[in-house]
Amino acid sequence: MDSWKIVAAALMVSINAHASEGSDDSYNNSMLSVLMAPTYTVAGTTGLTMLASNNFKPAKADALAFIGSKGEIRGAQFEQAVRFYHTTYAPPLMTDHQLALAIATSF
């Protein structure tokens, strides 16, 4: 199941459980907020991490070709990953060669 679907299902369950409770107790409302806020934060950051890995995983073979050819071969998947990286980090934190090494070792 997709991570976004899991987050949406958890949100719907928590809303239904909260709506069916029917109490106006502020303690219960605050405890629900305190307990659910970290859950949603973790789910959101996990989803964003998975989104980034979806852009870099297909580029592993091209990154290895880039490393092996000393930068002469730039495959389409690696080029797409480089463009994603450059748009995500306005001043790039690493060179294309370092990015290729990171992709090759991480994914």
Image: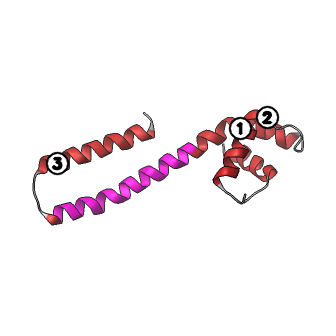
The label shown at residue 75 is: 2
Q: 85 or 1, which is in the foreground? A: 85
Which residue position holds label 3? 19
Give the CA separation, mark 2 to mark 1: 8 Å
Which residue position holds label 1? 59
Task: Pinpoint residue 73: horizontal percent, then vertical percent.
Answer: 86, 37
**Which portion, as a residue range, is magenta?**
27-51
Q: Label 2's element?
A: loop
- Who's the residue at 34% across and 59% down the image? 37
Q: In the rendered view, does 41 fall on the left or right side of 72? A: left
- Who's the residue at 75% across and 57% down the image? 94
What amino acid does circle 2 point to?
Gly
Task: Pinpoint residue 58: horizontal percent, then vertical percent.
Answer: 67, 35
Q: Answer yes or no: do the residues labelled 2 and 1 have beta carbons within 8 Å?
A: yes
Give the CA separation, mark 3 to mark 2: 52 Å
What amino acid does circle 3 point to?
Ala
Q: Is residue 49 magenta?
A: yes
Tell us which disc is closer to us: 3 or 1. Answer: 3
